[in-house]
Image (spheres, grey):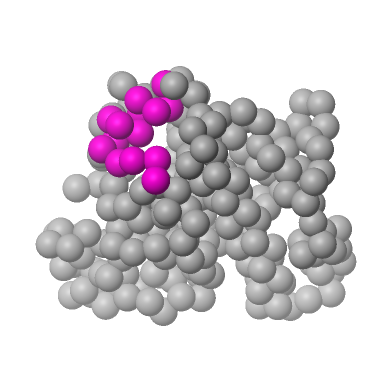
Amino acid sequence: MTVCGGDPLPIGGGVPGPGVSGSLTGPNIDPLLNDISGLIASLSTAALEAQLFNVDSIALKAYGGQFSKRLRNGDIFEDCVKDIVNLQITPEQWADALDNVSVLNGPTSAESLAGTLPVGSIERQVAQDRNLTVGGQFGPGTVAWSSANDNRVWINPFYVNAGDALEGSSLIAHETLHNLGLIDSVIQGSSGLMSPTLLTIFRKSWELTALSSPPTL
């Protein structure tokens, strides 16, 4: 199952096994996934983080691309179409956000936090006054942080499971909604109208990114 419809399309032609949410295959990421235990044993923390980020960013962009195609082709459940309407966006807008997302390494980022928060918000002003950074938001448990003003999504490479199609699809789908300017209060405020499929997936994503989203206004 993936966001808004059907089983996830495995990357590189692999086939998900029975009872498995999806597989991630392909020449660009298979070697890194297969050698991950060796990397943990042989690399420094910084080097390992860089390698994990490479795997995670490739996977998230691929999952986003899969979902984008389904949005553009209408290969989503009818209830999901209603959910998108309730969020006051179009499938094309969400697809564009998924296709153009820029995945960045969060813990090492010195980017100003203020620039990622809604323009005119109290949170933005506080972040600016305190010179807060995106990297500073990545304490224990923070998986991702998204800009509410552009296409950037920062991740913690150690917390993203690149091989889990459901988790990865949920994560990138949720974070790109923030790129469209939707904050959690807006998304959650529509949850009473959201279909069980989309709501269940987003609830999982909210749990994964409990500290990661732009503050609720």
The answer to whether any part of residue 159 appears in the image is: no
Give the quarter of the figure containing the N terminus. top right
Residue name at image x 84 percent, y 74 percent: 42
Query: In the image, is 130 to the left or to the right of 209?
Result: left
Q: Quadrant of residue 83?
A: top left
Residue name at image x 39 percent, y 28 percent: 81
Count the numbered circles shown: 0
Residue name at image x 42 percent, y 54 percent: 96
Query: In the image, is 126 to the left or to the right of 137?
Result: left
Residue name at image x 32 percent, y 75 percent: 112
Q: Is residue 200 highlighted in magenta?
A: no
Residue 159 position within the rendered picture, expressed as x and y whole percent measured from the top left: 60, 55
Residue 177 position within the rendered picture, expressed as x and y whole percent measured from the top left: 37, 47
**In the rendered structure, which segment of residues is drawn in magenta?**
79-92
The answer to whether any part of residue 124 appears in the image is: yes
Q: Quadrant of residue 51?
A: bottom right
Name the foreground residue: 18 vs 136: 18
Name the foreground residue: 75 vs 124: 75
Name the foreground residue: 5 vs 159: 5
Residue lying at the far front of the rendered structure: 73
Prevailing secondary structure of the magenta residues: helix
Residue 33 position within the rendered picture, expressed as x and y whole percent measured from the top left: 80, 58
Q: Quadrant of residue 14?
A: top right
Residue 117 position within the rendered picture, expressed as x and y whole percent measured from the top left: 26, 62
